[in-house]
Image: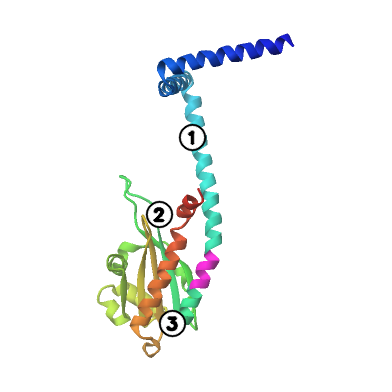
Amino acid sequence: MNNLKEKVSIAIKWLSEMCDLIAKHGLWKIFLAMLMTALVILGVVALSNPKQVIEYVHNVRIDIEKNRHKELLQYRMEIEPKIDKLISFTQDSLNASRIFILEPHNGTTTLNGIPFWYLNMTFERCNNVGYVKRLYKDIEANEFPLAYQVYVNHEWKGTMEELSKIDPKLSRFMMINEAEYAVIVSMMGTDAFLGFVGITYTQLENVPDYEKIRRVLHCTAQKITVYLDGYDKRKTRQN
């Protein structure tokens, strides 16, 4: 019982001293003093054990990266069936021979850190033509002038003959893959370029009215953009 009275007495005395300090100096100044004290203690610990501190920070950073990778992978697994369903519907609506998505990635960088621009075909749906998705991996965008043109102008349409005038190499590739006509639009996220959505036709007589293609394809691109650009935005909304 006496032990309990002592603890209560000490607590009351401590609270009384804190009230006196707050009345004398103000709550904000006391908070700053406690913060500075904590920073000084951390600084002393860091100086006395620099190797241990660096190792701890490194491990924390690795854990953060691993957790983010897991979350992003899970998110990717959630959105891929939705995107696949969306492009399948778009292909049927436009009666296209092929619909595809090209997404950019940074394979490597220059010595001063400037990234190279690569593209991967990540989605493809076909109708009476062969699949070519595996052939369009790690494409260096600077090899194909059309990529930059669509990036700047947001869309391109035309026959393979018209494409050959600005990008003969890509025109040959697409003709080998049974394309005679193509429409490609870009996808721009909130903070970054997200890639291209395109459709091709094997026969010109099967190509619908361009305004219809343009309207449907841009609408599809916007919906895909919401998925590809949506992870951090979704986290923000949840918080």
What secondary structure predominates along the stretch shown in magenta? helix
> Mark 3 vs mark 1: which is more N-terminal?
1
Residues drawn in magenta: 80-86
Nearer to the camera, 86 or 48: 86
Sooner in the amino-acid sequence: mark 2 or mark 3: 3
Numbered badge on residue 58: 1
The residue at the point 52 percent across, 35 percent down is 59
Label 1's element? helix
Q: Secondary structure at mark 2?
A: loop
Q: CA distance from mark 2 to mark 3?
A: 34 Å
The residue lying furthest to the left in this view is: 165
| Distance between mark 2 and mark 1 Cα atoms | 24 Å
User: Dot 2 surroundings within 10 Å: few (below 14), some, or many (20 or more)?
Assistant: few
Please, is residue 204 above or below residue 30 in the view?
below
Residue ID for mark 2: 107
What's under tag 2, amino acid-wise?
Answer: Gly
Residue in view at x 70 percent, y 13 percent: 4
Residue type, label 1 = His
Res 131 seen here? no
Q: Residue at x 40, y 77 (%)?
A: 216
- Residue 94, numbered label: 3
On the image, the x and y values in percent for residue 104 come to 39, 60
Q: Earlier in the sequence, mark 2 or mark 1?
A: 1
